[in-house]
Amino acid sequence: MTPPNTHPYLLESASQTAGPYVHIGCLPNDVGLPMYGGANLGARMLGDGFEGDRVTVRGRVIDGTGMVLRDAMVEAWQADAEGRFPPDAAPGFHGFARSGCDADGVWTFETTRPGAVPFADGRPQHPHVTLMVFARGINLGLHTRMYWPGADLDGDPMLARIEQRERRETLVAREEDGGLRFDIRLQGPGETVFLDV
Amino acid sequence: MREMTKTPGAKGGLIQRARGVHPPAHDPAYRTTVTRSPRLAPLSFPSGPAEETGPVFGHDLLGERDADLITNFTGEEAIGPRIVVTGTVRDETGRPVPGALLEVWQANAGGRYRHARDGYLAPLDPNFGGCGRCMTGEDGTYAFRTIQPGPYPWPNGMNDWRPAHIHFSLFGHSFGQRLITQMYFEGDPHIPLCPIVGTIPDPDAVDRLTARLDWQATIPMDTRAYRFDIVLRGRRQTPFENRPEAL
């Protein structure tokens, strides 16, 4: 039998803010730096050879005063339509995307509706994408989820853990212009539920 | 999907994040956090496949000069103190993390970023873009070459300066390990004065973000070396843990 751990335990390195120039490192081609063959990492969730439904997700990141952030980066990670994660996912499905915010503060990526993925105890969860938000003034990347509309708010094992029932709505996208819309509120009324997983 | 396994020594869930080593979301001394920090408690639950999987990047992602910030912008050499940064990426269980992707970005030798929003008076270096990337090998080690960045002033308090630093973005093996941080340089007097460094509650955690001069690795008459080891979150290695069958 393998012992639990024979190495000394270490402490995780401390997080620091991604700062105002996160684009230079993570989205250089968006800020006039022609790097990496002109393609940013995570430019496309759906790559060559992907076959299936496509949907565009758009949203904004909003601070505690209602101001829309223009310097944030949002990353997405999700399963394919069958609930499989790369490298076991459908051909052309990368599962990962990242987007900066444009002049209007809008981040966006194109994806497909994911299948059910199990919760830690094995129960299926409603279709969702994991999101991480990085920006100046955010000391530790903020982890959240966007659920597809029509979520059974009582049936999903994660959503059921949210004590204030009205806050579950902060994690559900709405349909808009043929795609999905999901705003992330960092603070104040309608504050998004953030996760510590 | 609901099948459960009992595999002695199999990987369990992510170890609970040690919140005490990380900065709190709200720290008024770093003023931008005041309106960007959640006020409500985060929701905790055990990790599952959504957090225990993550994007996998192959070494074929990397271009020939991605890890050389001195020449990767124009092909000509950037100006400033030449350094190599090396280190090992491990997880909390002490094991090396092979195949981790590191993205780095930084100011130039004068403390200026190549960015439309940076108006600091230090000149841009026409041959310095300020970003690069590399991956860890099978032993968890990484290396990149760059110019030592300069300190610079930033709008926060009336007279706040950032210590010289390099931003690091890391992908381990699972999305729950995702980490963005900054590396500082041993002996920099700006470190204890900086409100962003000061968001970290534990001085030992700041010390672990401070790279050491690696004298033995220094290339004589050419390039100094700094060593910066990084620890990502780990997963439990617990015998007899009940786990859902992985997908």
Image: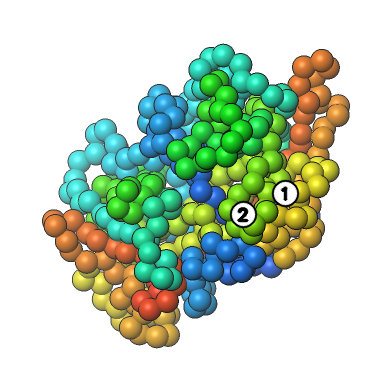
Rendering quarter of residue A180: bottom left
Residue under numbered circle 1: B209
Q: Judge from the rendering whether residue B170 lies leftward or rightward of residue B54; answer left or right.
A: right
**Label 2: few (<14), some or many (≥20) within 10 Å?**
many
Rendering quarter of residue A188: bottom left
User: Between B83 and B173, which is closer to the camera in this rendering?
Assistant: B83
Q: Judge from the rendering whether residue B134 lies leftward or rightward of residue B20; answer left or right.
A: left
Kind of residue at badge 2: Gln
Q: Judge from the rendering whether residue A106 lies leftward or rightward of residue B186; answer left or right.
A: left
Whether residue A77 appears in this view of the structure is no
Q: Secondary structure at mark 1?
A: loop
Determine the residue positioned at 41% across, 36% down: A31
Give residue A105's mark: none
Locate residue A42, reporting x and y percent: 39, 41
Please tell me whether residue A167 is drawn above or below residue A130 in the rendered image.
Answer: below
Determine the residue positioned at 67% across, 53% down: B160
Locate residue B108, reporting x and y percent: 62, 31
Determine the residue positioned at 60% across, 43% down: B168
CA–CA distance in space, label 1 to label 2: 10 Å
Locate residue B147, reporting x and y percent: 67, 27
Locate residue B134, reporting x and y percent: 57, 32
Kind of residue at badge 1: Leu
**Label 1: few (<14), some or many (≥20) within 10 Å?**
many
Residue under numbered circle 2: A16
Count how many numbered circles sit on residues in the image.
Answer: 2
Quarter holding the N terminus of chain B is bottom left
Please tell me whether residue B130 is drawn above or below residue B27 in the rendered image.
Answer: above
Q: Judge from the rendering whether residue B56 lies leftward or rightward of residue B71; answer left or right.
A: left
